[in-house]
């Protein structure tokens, strides 16, 4: 079992190695800059000003570079500050003073004092030339700059860009916009004018494809036709969408969709799709290590082979193999080989131009805390390509699990007994047969290093029996993720998920392979993986058995620390209901008073494959009464399913009873790749 003092020792070691005050010293002529303060800044954030300057403060951490003062650069920075204010509408702004404040031997703080003055505001804004473009004028919307606003160079240029973009997305492919501004600093006013020359309006003409050898031109043209249709009004935006759709075919190293030479007489512009085919076959291999504090370790090797044009027509065949060895450190430690072999074949446009077909087969040998297993999983799916951000995948799934080394309390008089993990299984075989529909929308700016946007996904499953095997149920899991940038280096992220497993005219709890569990680096971080769950004491070890309902969520503040290193503070919540055949049992997780909470912090190191993440989660105490021992101030697991049952030794003699409650370690440390969500 994980011990809190070991976790604290590891945490202290990380903090000692990874942080600390930088104490480098310079010389009297070139002191080290310990801080750069901007005083008097209100209209512009001090961080915005600092990032534009050559003079920078040294980092706060041991690995950061010590930056020495450059007097010449500091002199130029004075003019940079004033120029930045002028560009943002403050033409009276000036730097009143630049001071060097001693901060120890060979160390100084740089203080820049700013007097912003009054801003220049827009007193007049005229746009001429849009009378002949009513469609564009109707789509133009609110301009980034209007009368009464502070006149900024960014807003001034953004108006031109918006007018030009609207025209070129409405058919006026050769539109021109000229801009003119008269700024009167003494009067703090500015007059702005934009003159539009729309030119001739064009429609899309024929689509030409160049650069392909093995991929049929018609296949590429059909993909582009989803965004660009001959006869529609010309649009730069449609060209960009066509380029994305062609690239999403996954077989090109480069794609460029551009307009051809306009045909003035016919009023059309042809579309040119230029592609560069990438190698269709790839091989990959490498080692891997999985570490979850002192609960589970595994080492493995992976290998894969992909053919993106298997026998032509963009058929895709992918083979993956992961083989390794795992150790689980519990009261009854266990270890053994683990592996996963996957084969996936997909055919684009198998049903129609927008409906693909795919089949996936998985063979796995795995270790869980309560059992070992072999599994065979088969999925037939028909992904619908509606729009790039949408996911709509109906599928049929068949999963077969053969469980062995199942944890149970020994009863010599009943040698053929089966443990609770085998409820609603036939012998040691658990089967799930179900239809699934996954519907989602991804509005994130980047799925790996997300800074803003929304992601929502809902999974629906309808389970049914195959003869004597299987379980009839409905399973619904909606999830939402939200990301809001608070500043250039700070993001507020939130996630919420609810799961409902509803038995349909079934007696007994669902098979353990269908139930919900929580806890871990992608869930409630106050617990280790799957340890926030109803549990049973079996053969001297606490085994998570899952439940019918799940509720978990997170609120996380992510921020930059230094270079590729970032940090986060978070608040997690979660709960899992009891396993039962009662259809309404899942609703108990909707009671907010039953949620368990954890708070903590983490460190991230950003890589092209996603951040390497170290999180430390601490459960929030629930019992503050005097006299309560420290470990008992923290919450218990949601339920103990065999509470009160006798505990017997190998001879059948009763040596105790199962406790009514159980607590997991109140602190958990997680090391993983990728953000929590």
Image (cartoon, rainbow, N blue to C red):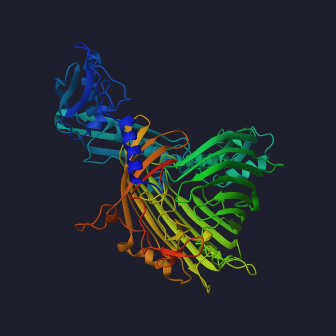
Of 49 and 352, the residue lying toward us: 49
Instruction: Work out whether residue 316 can be spotted.
Output: yes
Of 145 and 531, the residue lying toward us: 531
Residue 61's spot in the image, x, y percent?
34, 32
Instruction: Work out whether residue 491 can be spotted.
Output: no
Residue 483's spot in the image, x, y percent?
42, 54
* Residue 536 located left or right of residue 596: right
Can you tell which quarter of the image residue 648 is in? bottom right
Residue found at the far top of this picture: 29
Residue 361's spot in the image, x, y percent?
74, 59
Residue depicted at x 63% and y 77%? 423
Can you tell which quarter of the image residue 493 is in? bottom left
Of 35 and 41, the residue lying toward us: 35
Residue 255's spot in the image, x, y percent?
66, 40
Residue depicted at x 22% and y 34%? 184
Residue depicted at x 73% and y 48%? 220
* Residue 380 located left or right of residue 297: right
């Amino acid at each position: 079992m994980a011990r809190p003092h070991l976790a604290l020792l590891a945490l202290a070691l990380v903090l000692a190695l990874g942080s600390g005050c930088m104490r480098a010293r310079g010389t009297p002529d070139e002191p080290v800059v310990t801080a750069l303060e901007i005083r008097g800044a209100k209209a512009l954030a001090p961080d915005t000003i600092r990032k534009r300057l050559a003079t920078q403060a040294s980092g706060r951490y041991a690995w950061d570079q010590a930056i020495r003062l450059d007097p010449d650069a500091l002199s130029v920075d004075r003019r940079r500050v004033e120029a930045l204010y002028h560009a943002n509408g403050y033409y009276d702004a000036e730097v009143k003073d630049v001071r060097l404040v001693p901060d120890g031997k060979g160390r100084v703080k740089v203080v820049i004092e700013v007097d912003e003055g009054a801003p220049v505001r827009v007193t007049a804004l005229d746009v001429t030339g849009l009378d002949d473009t009513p469609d564009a004028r109707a789509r133009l919307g609110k301009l980034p700059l209007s009368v009464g606003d502070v006149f900024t160079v960014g807003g001034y240029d953004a108006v031109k860009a918006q007018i030009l973009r609207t025209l070129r997305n409405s058919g006026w492919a050769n539109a021109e916009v000229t801009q003119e501004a008269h700024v009167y600093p003494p009067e703090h006013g500015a007059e702005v004018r934009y003159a539009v020359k729309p030119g001739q309006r064009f429609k899309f003409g024929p689509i030409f494809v160049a650069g392909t050898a093995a991929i049929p031109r018609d296949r590429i043209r059909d993909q582009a036709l989803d965004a660009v249709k001959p006869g529609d009004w010309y649009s730069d935006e449609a060209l960009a969408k066509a380029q994305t759709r062609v690239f999403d075919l996954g077989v090109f190293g480069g794609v460029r969709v551009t307009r051809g030479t306009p045909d003035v007489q016919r009023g059309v512009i042809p579309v040119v799709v230029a592609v560069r085919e990438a190698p269709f076959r790839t091989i990959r291999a490498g080692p891997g290590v999985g570490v979850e504090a002192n609960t589970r370790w595994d080492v493995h090797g992976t290998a894969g082979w992909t053919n993106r044009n298997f026998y032509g027509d963009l058929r895709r065949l992918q083979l993956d193999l992961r083989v390794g060895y795992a150790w689980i450190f519990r009261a009854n430690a266990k270890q053994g080989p683990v592996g996963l072999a996957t084969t996936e074949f997909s055919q684009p446009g198998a049903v129609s131009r927008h409906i693909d077909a795919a089949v996936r087969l998985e063979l796995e040998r795995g270790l869980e805390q309560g059992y070992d297993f072999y599994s065979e999983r088969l999925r037939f799916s028909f992904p619908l390509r509606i729009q790039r951000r949408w996911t709509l995948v109906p599928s049929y799934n068949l999963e077969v699990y053969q469980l062995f080394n199942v944890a149970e309390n020994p009863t010599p008089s009943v040698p053929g007994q089966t443990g609770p993990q085998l409820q609603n299984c036939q012998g040691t075989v658990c089967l799930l047969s179900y239809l699934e529909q996954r519907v989602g929308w991804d509005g994130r700016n980047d799925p790996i290093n997300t800074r803003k946007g929304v992601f929502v996904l809902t999974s629906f499953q309808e389970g049914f029996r195959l003869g004597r095997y299987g379980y009839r149920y409905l399973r619904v899991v909606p999830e939402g993720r939200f990301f809001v940038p608070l500043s250039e280096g700070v993001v507020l992220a939130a996630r919420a998920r609810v799961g409902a497993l509803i038995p349909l005219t079934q007696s007994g709890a669902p098979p353990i392979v269908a139930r919900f569990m929580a806890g871990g680096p992608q869930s409630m971080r106050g617990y280790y993986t799957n340890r926030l769950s109803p549990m049973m004491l079996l053969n001297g070890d606490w085994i998570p058995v899952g439940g019918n309902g799940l509720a978990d969520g997170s609120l996380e503040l992510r921020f930059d620390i230094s270079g590729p290193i970032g940090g986060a503070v978070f608040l997690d919540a979660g709960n899992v209901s009891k396993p039962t055949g009662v259809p309404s049992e899942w609703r108990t997780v909707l009671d907010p008073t039953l949620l368990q909470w954890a708070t903590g912090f983490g460190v991230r190191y950003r890589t092209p494959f996603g951040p390497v993440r170290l999180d430390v989660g601490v459960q929030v105490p629930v019992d503050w009464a005097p006299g309560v021992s420290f470990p008992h101030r923290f919450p218990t697991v949601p339920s103990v399913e065999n509470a009160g049952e006798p505990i017997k030794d190998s001879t059948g003699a009763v040596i105790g009873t199962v406790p009514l409650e159980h607590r997991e370690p109140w602190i958990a440390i997680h090391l993983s790749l990728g953000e929590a969500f």
